[in-house]
Amino acid sequence: MFTEQQIRNFSNLDYDLYKYIIGNQEKVIYMRIRDLAKETHVSTTSILRFCKKLGLDGFSEFKIKLKLYLEDVNDNNILNEKSSLNEFLERTLNQDFENKITEIAAIIAKSENIIFIGNGTSGILAEFGARYFSGLKKFSFHINDPFFPIDNASFEDETVIVLSVSGESKPIIHLTNRVKEKDNTVISITNRSDSTLAQLSDYNLSYFVTEEHINASNLTTQVPVIYFLESLAKKTYQLMNE
């Protein structure tokens, strides 16, 4: 509803209006401009000026936009966990997938070290992946800061596994480009195979499930990612011991 740029340009009076609206959204969509002015102790002119800053013609348009926003938020339903898992099983797990796991694991088995990269939830899973691989005798570490400096010579000729649900995170894509510049092999795990990150990678594993969002939070199931990581680690361990 409110962008970061808009909020940064708010005056103190705008912030007071903003805080009241955020705390009373369901109420505000039914209020007259005079009612809101009385509740927030500002003039109707200040409210109209506030609306203009949001790129709106007036308070009526603001209420319409707020109402649509609330309807969109309320329409965000979380999928049943079995539905998400069934999508993954039906669309992804097949013989081609097993062959791809074996192919990628063979690359990992020959690598000296494995570097995992991710941000947010993917950053947490990157740490999990690094610990899981290390537990199976393949030393790994993780980077969960997309602005991590990689100019060190040790970031050359490594295998890098990048995790991202959307595959469109600009900081992650930027870091992946930097990694590729140093002749590293990039393996990505994303939800879609047509994402920017997937296209940048040497190898990609995609899990093709319906993405789930509540407001700005991406709540898409990460069960497939854990399955991919464990499958790769176990297959790598097997190949290392053959």
Image: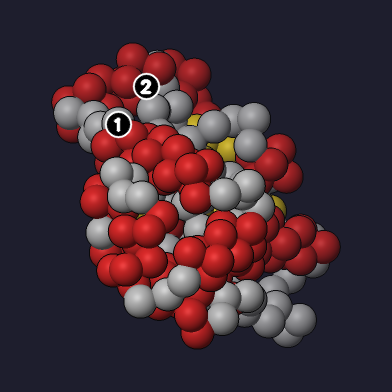
Horizontal side of residue 197 vs 104, given as left or right: right
Residue 220: x, y in percent?
A: 35, 41
**Which disc number belongs to residue 75?**
1
- Quarter of the image where the C terminus is located: top left
- Looking at the rendered image, the disc whose residue lies closer to the viewer, 1 or 2, is 1
| SS of the residue under disc 2 | loop
Binning the other alpha carbons within 10 Å of mark 1 as few (below 14), some (14 to 19) or many (20 upward) gives few
Amino acid type of the residue that numbered disc 2 sits on in the rendered structure: Leu
**Which disc number belongs to residue 93?**
2
Near-viewer residue (148 or 105): 148
Residue 137: x, y in percent?
A: 37, 65
Mark 1 vs mark 2, CA separation in Å: 30 Å
Is residue 56 placed above or below 5 in the rendered structure?
Answer: above
- Is any atom of residue 235 visible in this view? no
Near-viewer residue (214 or 220): 214
Residue drawn at x 76%, y 59% is 177
Binning the other alpha carbons within 10 Å of mark 2 as few (below 14), some (14 to 19) or many (20 upward) gives few
- Is any atom of residue 57 visible in this view? yes
Q: How is the image coloured?
A: secondary structure
Horizontal side of residue 44 vs 146, given as left or right: left
Residue 200, quarter of picture: top right
Residue drawn at x 26%, y 59% is 24
Is residue 212 placed above or below 178 in the rendered structure?
Answer: above
Amino acid type of the residue that numbered disc 1 sits on in the rendered structure: Asp
Residue 98, quarter of picture: top left
| SS of the residue under disc 1 | loop
Residue 173: x, y in percent?
A: 68, 56
Residue 15, quarter of picture: bottom left
Residue drawn at x 25%, y 32% is 77
Near-viewer residue (37 or 241): 37
Q: Which of marks 1 and 2 is nearer the N terminus?
A: 1
Is residue 141 placed above or below 195 in the rendered structure?
Answer: below
